[in-house]
Amino acid sequence: MTLLSVNLNKIAVLRNSRGGDEPEITRAAITCIETGCGGITVHPRPDLRHVRPDDVRTLATLLRGRVEYNIEGNPFAAPRGAYPGLIALAREVRPTQVTLVPDSDGQITSDHGFDLERDAARLRPIIDELRELGCRVSLFVDPGAKGFEHGVAMGAERIEIYTGPYAHAFAEGDAKEQLALCADTARRAQQAGLAVNAGHDLSQANLGTLRAAIPGLAEVSIGHALIGEALYEGLATTVRNYLQILR
């Protein structure tokens, strides 16, 4: 079954909007794990607007030996203040997977992937270091991306397809073209020897269609829609709904 990794960034956004510790990100993680999710995802950013480095460390202790831990981020974002940098965090907590994403400081959310040919030279030493730490490395790519042989040569083991365009097209009522693009991207990546993850704007409404179109889909990372839906149905019920879709 495709692994469900729940992104907890929105829990941290809600907590940070008021200050203090509520809602507790650890309690949310425990709820998701006890309900059956296979992983937890966080995406710490240098401006600390949601998940913070101390959250990353606390969750590492909580999750170890229980579920997969996926940390996303831009490896080229410079350390500042309490943010030590993505690689330094990975060095500290040794997550199961690090997903490298080329987002800038000013982006509200990730909205594009790496060019695997153009970015190969600067990504290779980062991937080497993460692999030495025992982390699986996934590269965030656009639907329609090319050059998967470069990803394999760099030592990456997975890609994550940016599914924002697909989700937008699905909401507009015509996702056929974007769905085919995601499926073709997955097929070519798998043929090159990479496992395939997917994430961004996936929801209960659009996940089943994507899952059916990508045989062997390894993992989906879902946060924004899942947490939004949980406001109405509860977190445990919502996680169960996603797991049922993936089955």
Image: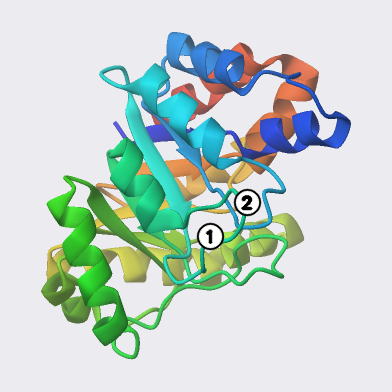
In this picture, is 1 found above or below 239? below
Q: Is residue 17 left or right of residue 136?
A: right
Which residue corresponds to mark 1?
Answer: 163
Could you tell me the amino acid type at mark 1? Answer: Thr
Q: Is residue 37 left or right of residue 186?
A: right
| Residue reaching furthest to the front | 81
Q: CA distance from mark 2 to mark 1?
A: 7 Å
In this picture, is 208 found above or below 143? above
> Which residue sits at x=82%, y=29%?
19
Which residue corresponds to mark 2?
Answer: 201
> Which residue sits at x=73%, y=16%?
233
| CB under 8 Å between discs 2 and 1 | yes
Binning the other alpha carbons within 10 Å of mark 1 as few (below 14), some (14 to 19) or many (20 upward) gives: many
> Which residue sits at x=33%, y=23%?
67
Binning the other alpha carbons within 10 Å of mark 2 as few (below 14), some (14 to 19) or many (20 upward) gives: many
Q: Is residue 171 left or right of residue 185?
A: right
x and y percentages locating residue 157 in the rendered image: 19, 58
- Total count of labels: 2
Q: Quadrant of residue 204?
A: top right
Could you tell me the amino acid type at mark 2? Answer: Asp
| Residue reaching furthest to the top | 34
